[in-house]
Amino acid sequence: MELTPVQIRILGCLVEKQTTTPDNYPLTTNALVAACNQTSNRDPVVSLDERTVDAGMLELRTEGLARTVTGGRANKHRHVLDEAWGLSPAELAVLAVLFLRGPQTPGELRQRTERMHGFDDLDALEGVLEGLARRLDPFVAQLDRVPGQKERRWAHLVGEELRVVDGDAAGVRLQPDTPEDLPVEAPSELRAEVAQLRADVDRLYELLGESPPGAP
């Protein structure tokens, strides 16, 4: 599985709204755009335009992960992840929150899935996470512990996370990683290797008497 950040945001919103606002589900295009750009319960907050969301829905329909109901005054959109991926309501809730807010601890996930699916305790939620991680094609993985944090976080594995987003003609732009931007859970060897590669490139530019791109 390798979904785009826009596809992931759309699916998270569809799963969330199915349970939190069932009277308004399936979602119209306008409602789906508003859900994607919602400022609460989203990390990061984005500004996607209608064209970008429509393109994402087209791709999801092609992948068999969502459907659009035509007819009436407006088209309406819904996910079919339960059918396509064989997911339970509990698994859908956990994945939706990971799609919408990125890596989180079990405690955070339990609190944030409450409106979609209530877990009796952390053991129940961790059981769902472990089940998703044990699949032949895993949906989630546990990350290394962040310094200063007691609990290890979990992340989804279905595609790239949205990082820094600016509104533009395409609706979303991802900024490339720099060594300083690499996740804290990235292996120290990888961070050191990236830093060394950048230093080598800078030295090459110095030998050529030129300034590296982006240098002041």
Image (spheres, helix red, strand yellow):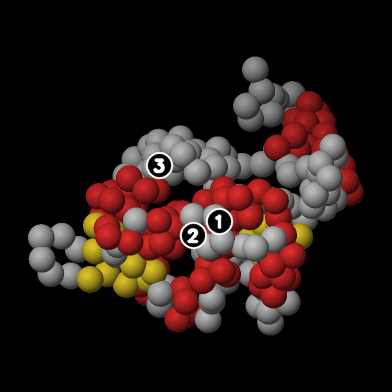
The residue lying at 10 percent from left, 60 percent from top is: 73
In the orientation shown, which residue stands out farthest toward the top?
A: 216
Measured from the top left, where is residue 3 in percent x and y?
52, 64
Q: How crowded is mark 2: few (under 14 residues within 10 Å), some or many (20 or more)?
A: many
Residue 201 lies in what quarter of the image? top right
At label 3, the amino acid type is Gln
| Closer-to-camera residue (30/49) | 30
Q: Where residue 38 is drawn, which disc sits there?
A: 3
Marks 1 & 2, CB-CB < 8 Å contact: yes
Element carrying mark 2: loop
Compared with 91, 147 (above or below) is above
The residue carrying mark 2 is 116
Mark 3 and mark 1 lie on one chain; the one further toward the N terminus is: 3
The residue carrying mark 1 is 113
Q: Distance between the residues labelled 1 and 2?
A: 5 Å
At label 2, the amino acid type is Met
Residue 132 lies in what quarter of the image? bottom right
The residue lying at 38 percent from left, 63 percent from top is: 18
The quarter of the image holding the N terminus is bottom right
Q: How far apart are marks 3 and 1 (CA)?
A: 17 Å
The residue lying at 56 percent from left, 69 percent from top is: 90
